[in-house]
C-alpha cells in the first residue's frame, strides 16, 4: 500500500473526457472517463493519507485560531497555531479518553471501543479537527451539526445517528438537555462542554476552566442520566489511559453527513474512510502545495470537510474564522490565506461591488472599465491573470479585501455564472474554478481543468471516475440530442457513498444496480467533453445561496391568491430569490386595478386590464397578496416571491403552456417568458419583509 501523492499530469483542454468504446447502452450515453488519467484507484483510507501528511510536516503549523481575550472581550489580532505534532498528540489523547469512557460504561453498556457515534455541535474551530481525527484513529463515527439548527432538527440528528457523546458549546447545552429530559435522546450519555470561544494557547495548555461554568448543567444533566465533562477532563483522562490507534478499513463508516431537504427528515449519507482516502489522493492531480485555507463554511457540510482534508494531505494549514461571518474579511486580513473556498452567494457580492464601481461616473469608473477590459482580453487570449500596471494601481486594493494573498478560489454548492468567475479571476489575479459534487460523493465529482479559459461548464470528472447520462425523454433530454448529448448525470467512483444510514428505500432511489449515483441534475456534454449542468430532474430547485426550494409545493400555497387565475413560480440556480409569472383573475383583479389607478375598469375590459398589468403600483399591490400568503403559511424568506410579471394572456393547451390535465408546462413557459423573466430580475428583489412591497 502506498500513500504517495500521484504524479502531476497535464490536463488536455480540447477533449477533457473520453467516451469508453462500446459502453453506450439504450437510454444512456456512453460512459466517459478522464482524458488526463482514465483509470486510477487507491486502497488507502483517509486515516492513512493524513497520517502520512503528519509524518512529512511534523513541526509545521496545522490548526490556527484567533484567541479570545477575556479582558478586552474580543478576539486577538493574530492567529495562534497547533503544529501537526500537537494535533496528533491531542487527537490521540481525546480518542483515548473517549475509549476510557466507553470502557467504564459511561457511554452505555452496549458500547465497545469502536464503531459508535460522536457528535460535534460547534462553529468551526480546532476542536472539530481534533475530535474528527480522533474518531478516525479509533474507528468511530463523526456526526457534525450546523450551528444554526433548531431544537427539533438537532434532536432528530443526534438521535438518528445514535450519538453517545456530544461536543458542544454552552449555547446548545440547554436545548440538548431539554430533549434528553423529554426522552428524545435515549442513547446520549455524555456532553463535553467547550469554551464559547477558544482562548490563547497558554490558557488552553494550562487547562483553565471557570469552576462555576458547568455547575448548573451538571445538576440538570444528572436528572437526565447524562454526565458533563469539559475538554481538559477528556484530554487528561486520555493521557492517563493512552491506547494504540485502531485504524478504520476502507469500508468503515467515518461520518454521517445529513442532507437538507424541503420535506421530511434529512437523510444521513454514509461517508467511509475509503471515500476520504480516494479524495485526498486524487485531488493532488489538480492541486498540491502547502496552502493556508480559511475555514468558515459549516463543517456539517461536505464541501467544508472536503476542502480541509485535501489541504491537510498536502501539508497545508487550516485557519478557523472567529465565528462571526460579518468579521470574515477581518479574519482574512489577519490570516492572509492562499486558498479561499467559497460559494456563489459570497463571490457574487464581490463581483457586484466591482461592477458597481465600474459603472460609476468620472475618471475612476472609466479607468476601472479600461483596466477590466485589458485584463479580460489577456485572460481570453492566453489565460494571463496579471497586469504590471493595473494590478498595482487598481486591483491590489480589491485583492486586499481577501487578505492580499489568495491564489486559489473554489466555488461550489450552487452554480456560478461564467462572467462572474472570469471577473473574479482578473480582479483577484488568481486561479478561480468551479467544482460540482454531491454529499453522496464527498462533494467530489467534477472540477474545471487548470488554465481552462472557456467558461460555462463545471469541468470534467476526476481521474478514476465514470460518468454517463440517462435519457429523460419526458423533459426533452436524451443522449441523442444535437449538438450535444443531454440527460441526468450518473457518476461512479471510489468516493460514491454506500447508501443512507437506516434508509434502504432512499438508498435504492439514489444508486443504480450497477453502482452509479443518480445526481438528479441534467447536463450536456459540451464540445470540449466537459459537463455543463442545464436543469434538474425534479422540481426541487437550488437557489444560488444553496437553499433548496420545492417549486410545486410553493405553487400550491400561492394558489390561494384570489387575484390570480394562474401562476408560474420561477427561480434558477444563478439567483437567490424567486419570482412569479401570473395571469390575473379578471373579476377580482379589476376592482384592485380600479382602486389603485383611480378609475373604473370592468372585468370585461381586457385591454385596460392588460395596461394595468404594466403599472408598478398595481403589480406591487398584487405581489402584496403573495407576501401575505407566505407569511400566513410561515414560509422561509427564500420561499417568498420577490418579483412579478403580470399578463392577461392565459396559459392554455392551445398555446402549449398547459398539459391536457391543465398543469403548467414549466419548461415551455420559462422559454416563452424568457425576456420577461430577465426584465423582472433586472429590477431586483422587492422589499417584502414588512409592509407593502416596493418595486
Image (spheres, rainbow, N blue to C red):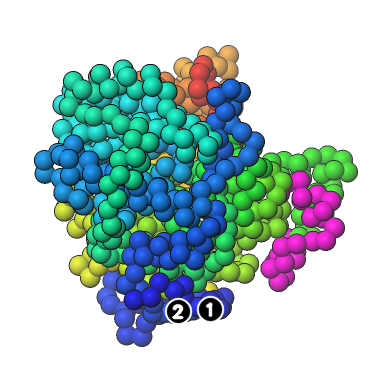
Frontmost residue, 377 versus 56: 56
Q: Is 628 placed above or below 272 here?
A: above
The tag on residue 30 is none
Q: Residue at x 62, y 55 (%)?
A: 338
In percent of width and height, residue 538 lies at 33, 50
In percent of width and height, residue 257 lies at 32, 48
In the image: residue 168, left or right of residue 363: left
Dots 2, 1 in contact, CB < 8 A? yes
Res. 180 image quadrant: top left
Q: Is residue 122 magenta?
A: no
Q: Is 162 placed above or below 278 here?
A: above
Q: Name the residue carrying label 1.
A: 9
Q: Residue at x 24, y 33 (%)?
A: 190
Q: Is residue 427 visible?
A: yes
Q: Residue at x 39, y 32 (%)?
A: 194
Q: Name the residue carrying label 2.
A: 37
Frontmost residue, 62 versus 428: 62
Res. 264 image quadrant: top left
Tell me which numbered mark, 2 or 1, is placed earlier along the sequence. Answer: 1
The stretch in magenta equals 376-399
In percent of width and height, residue 10 lies at 56, 78
In percent of width and height, residue 530 lies at 49, 70
Amino acid at each position: 500500500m502506498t500513500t504517495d501523492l500521484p504524479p502531476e499530469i497535464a490536463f488536455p483542454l480540447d477533449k477533457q473526457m473520453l467516451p469508453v468504446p462500446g459502453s453506450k447502452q439504450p437510454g444512456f450515453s456512453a460512459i466517459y472517463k478522464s482524458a488526463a488519467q482514465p483509470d486510477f484507484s487507491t486502497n488507502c483510507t483517509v486515516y492513512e493519507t493524513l497520517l502520512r501528511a503528519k509524518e512529512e510536516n511534523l513541526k509545521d503549523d496545522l490548526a490556527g485560531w484567533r484567541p479570545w481575550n477575556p479582558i478586552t472581550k474580543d478576539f486577538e489580532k493574530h492567529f495562534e497555531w497547533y503544529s501537526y505534532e500537537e494535533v496528533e498528540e491531542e487527537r490521540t489523547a481525546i480518542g483515548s479518553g473517549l475509549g476510557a469512557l466507553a470502557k467504564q460504561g459511561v457511554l452505555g453498556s452496549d458500547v465497545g471501543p469502536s464503531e459508535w457515534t460522536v457528535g460535534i455541535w460547534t462553529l468551526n474551530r480546532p476542536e472539530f479537527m481534533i475530535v474528527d481525527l480522533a474518531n478516525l484513529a479509533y474507528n468511530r463515527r463523526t456526526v457534525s451539526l450546523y450551528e444554526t439548527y433548531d431544537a427539533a432538527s438537532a434532536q432528530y440528528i443526534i438521535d438518528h445517528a445514535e450519538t453517545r457523546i456530544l461536543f458542544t458549546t454552552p449555547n446548545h447545552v440547554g436545548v440538548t438537555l431539554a430533549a434528553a429530559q423529554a426522552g428524545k435522546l435515549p442513547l446520549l450519555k455524555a456532553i463535553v462542554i467547550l469554551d464559547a470561544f477558544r482562548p490563547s494557547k497558554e490558557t488552553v495548555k494550562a487547562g483553565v476552566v471557570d469552576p462555576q461554568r458547568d455547575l448548573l448543567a451538571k445538576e440538570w444533566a444528572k436528572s437526565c442520566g447524562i454526565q458533563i465533562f469539559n475538554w481538559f477532563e477528556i484530554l487528561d483522562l486520555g493521557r492517563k489511559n493512552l491506547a494504540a490507534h485502531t485504524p478504520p478499513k476502507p469500508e468503515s463508516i467515518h461520518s454521517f453527513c445529513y442532507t437538507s431537504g424541503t420535506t421530511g427528515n434529512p437523510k444521513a449519507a454514509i461517508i467511509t474512510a475509503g471515500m476520504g482516502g480516494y479524495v485526498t489522493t486524487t485531488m493532488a492531480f489538480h492541486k498540491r502545495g502547502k496552502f493556508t485555507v480559511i475555514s468558515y463554511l459549516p463543517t456539517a457540510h461536505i464541501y467544508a470537510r472536503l476542502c480541509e482534508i485535501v489541504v491537510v494531505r498536502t501539508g497545508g494549514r487550516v485557519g478557523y474564522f472567529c465565528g462571526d461571518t460579518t468579521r470574515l474579511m477581518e479574519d482574512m486580513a489577519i490570516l492572509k490565506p492562499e486558498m479561499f473556498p467559497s460559494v456563489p452567494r459570497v463571490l457574487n457580492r464581490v463581483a457586484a461591488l466591482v461592477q458597481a464601481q465600474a459603472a460609476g461616473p468620472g475618471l475612476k469608473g472609466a479607468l476601472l472599465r479600461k483596466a477590466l477590459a485589458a485584463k479580460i482580453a489577456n485572460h481570453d487570449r492566453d489565460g494571463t491573470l496579471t497586469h504590471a500596471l493595473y494590478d498595482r494601481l487598481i486591483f491590489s486594493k480589491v485583492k486586499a479585501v481577501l487578505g492580499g494573498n489568495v491564489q486559489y478560489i473554489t466555488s461550489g454548492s450552487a452554480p456560478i455564472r461564467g462572467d462572474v468567475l472570469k471577473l473574479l479571476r482578473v480582479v483577484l489575479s488568481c486561479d478561480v474554478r468551479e467544482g460540482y459534487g454531491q454529499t453522496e460523493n464527498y462533494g467530489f465529482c467534477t472540477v474545471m481543468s487548470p488554465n481552462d479559459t472557456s467558461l460555462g461548464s463545471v469541468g470534467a470528472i476526476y481521474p478514476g471516475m465514470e460518468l454517463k447520462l440517462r435519457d429523460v425523454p419526458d423533459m426533452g433530454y436524451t443522449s441523442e440530442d444535437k449538438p450535444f448529448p443531454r440527460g441526468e448525470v450518473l457518476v461512479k467512483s471510489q468516493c460514491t457513498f454506500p447508501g443512507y444510514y437506516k434508509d434502504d428505500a432512499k438508498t435504492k432511489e439514489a444508486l443504480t444496480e450497477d453502482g452509479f449515483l443518480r445526481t438528479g441534475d441534467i447536463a450536456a456534454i459540451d464540445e470540449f467533453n466537459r459537463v455543463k449542468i442545464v436543469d434538474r430532474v425534479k422540481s426541487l430547485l437550488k437557489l444560488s445561496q444553496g437553499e433548496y426550494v420545492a417549486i410545486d409545493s410553493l405553487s400550491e400555497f400561492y394558489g390561494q391568491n384570489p387575484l390570480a387565475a394562474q401562476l408560474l413560480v420561477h427561480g434558477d440556480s444563478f439567483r437567490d430569490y424567486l419570482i412569479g409569472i401570473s395571469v390575473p383573475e379578471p373579476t377580482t383583479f379589476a376592482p384592485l386595478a380600479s382602486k389603485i389607478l383611480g378609475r373604473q375598469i370592468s372585468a370585461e375590459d381586457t385591454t385596460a386590464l392588460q395596461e394595468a398589468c404594466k403599472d408598478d403600483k398595481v403589480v406591487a399591490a398584487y405581489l402584496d397578496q403573495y407576501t401575505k400568503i407566505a407569511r400566513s403559511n410561515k414560509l422561509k424568506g427564500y420561499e417568498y416571491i420577490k418579483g412579478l410579471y403580470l399578463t392577461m394572456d392565459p396559459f392554455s393547451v392551445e398555446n402549449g403552456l398547459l398539459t391536457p390535465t391543465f398543469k403548467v408546462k414549466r419548461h415551455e413557459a420559462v422559454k416563452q417568458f424568457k425576456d420577461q423573466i430577465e426584465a423582472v430580475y433586472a429590477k431586483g428583489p422587492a422589499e417584502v419583509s414588512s409592509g407593502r412591497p416596493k418595486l
